[in-house]
Amino acid sequence: MSRKYNVAVVGANGAVGEEILAILEELNFPLNKLVPLASQRSVGKSVDFKGRSVPIQELTNTIFQEENIEIALFSAGGSVSAQFAHAAVEAGAVVIDNTSHFRMDKNTPLVVPEVNPEDIAQWTNTGIIANPNCSTIQMVQTLKPLNDVYGLQRVDVSTYQATSGAGKTAMEELVTQMQSFFAFKLDECEHKSFAHQIALNVIPQIDVFEENGYTKEEMKMVNETTKIMHKNIELSATCVRVPTLRGHAEALTLTFDKDVNAKEAREILSKAPNIIILDKPQESLYPMPSLCMGLNETFVGRIRVDNYRKNILHLFVVADNLRVGAATNAVRIAQKWVEMQGEIND
């Protein structure tokens, strides 16, 4: 009989936390006990899991020991992870953290299971495995198989990121603004989640700007890609917030060591794990956010060689940011970790 684990979900009633619960159920994760955790103001509420209501408990430094937690999935913001993750580790749990807090710590593995699953073995350094940024995850899933064949030199990426990347309140802000637009009152709407009105607009800023002119989000893609792929790849990103609810899209321009072939690239990507090719432009078939919502795969299309340089490939990548870009990746890390424990015990 396979081993089952006591699992805590920190931020269980947040946008990503809700997706983690859904994926744990869908994948029939080997759960012995589920412990949903959130702040004190959420105590008294509950989450639905496998047809039953599970009460949310207050997140404290002692709860992990009290509930004998073995796997703790954190998705409640960097400050929460900073305050409570080490308590989970001290209680004997492996922490899989979905925030940016531990990502660039040199002793903490940053993992996308389709790309660098071997790095999970480094979890014993700190007891923590970091989940990358949502825009990074779907990109490196695409880069890895192409880099293995052609040798990747440089990435130029422009993102089209949904409002859910900024949380539930940001999604609600878009909906409210659109309702106000149809009531001819959009000019009366406040914007709190973003620097500008998001309805009927695109905003070329995600997170704060740094001294080099790039935003923090853009530099996450640069630094995280290098760490995950163990390769110094030139990368320039322009991250843009768009008025969609779910599903991040990315236009990628990839420069390789040698000439590429579009048909061959499609075949390579079609064989890569958790990638689906949607690439029949004559039939208007290509990846779009509306096609990927609620799914656990990354969709790739518009694959074409550059008109001027045969070592440059252009493509379009879309994935559900709450799933592939966050919850799904976290649960896949947990699955791989469980597999490794079984191998060690064997």
Image: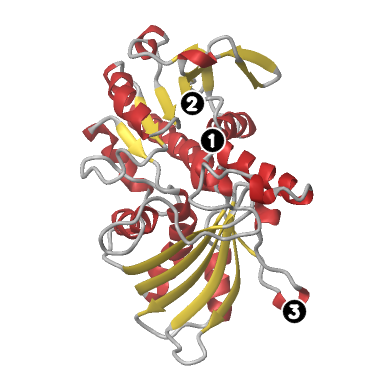
Cα distance between the residues tagged 2 and 1: 8 Å
Q: Amino acid at mark 1?
A: Val
- The secondary structure type at the circle numbered 1 is helix
Residue of label 1: 16
Residue of label 2: 11
Residue of label 3: 282
Q: In the rendered image of this protein, does residue 253 appear above or below residue 190?
A: below
Q: Amino acid at mark 3?
A: Gln
Q: From the image, which quarter does the C terminus lie in?
A: top left
Q: Judge by depth and name the residue closer to the eye, 322 or 69.
A: 322
Q: Amino acid at mark 2?
A: Gly
Task: Kindly identify the residue that appears in the image at 53 percent across and 11 percent down.
Answer: 43
Task: Kindly identify the residue that appears in the image at 27 percent across and 46 percent down.
Answer: 104
Q: Judge by depth and name the residue closer to the eye, 78 or 197.
A: 197
Q: Nearer the viewer, mark 1 or mark 3?
A: 1
Task: Kindly identify the residue that appears in the image at 40 percent across and 30 percent down.
Answer: 342
Cα distance between the residues tagged 1 and 3: 36 Å
Q: Measuring from the top left, give residue 175's x and y in whole percent.
A: 68, 44
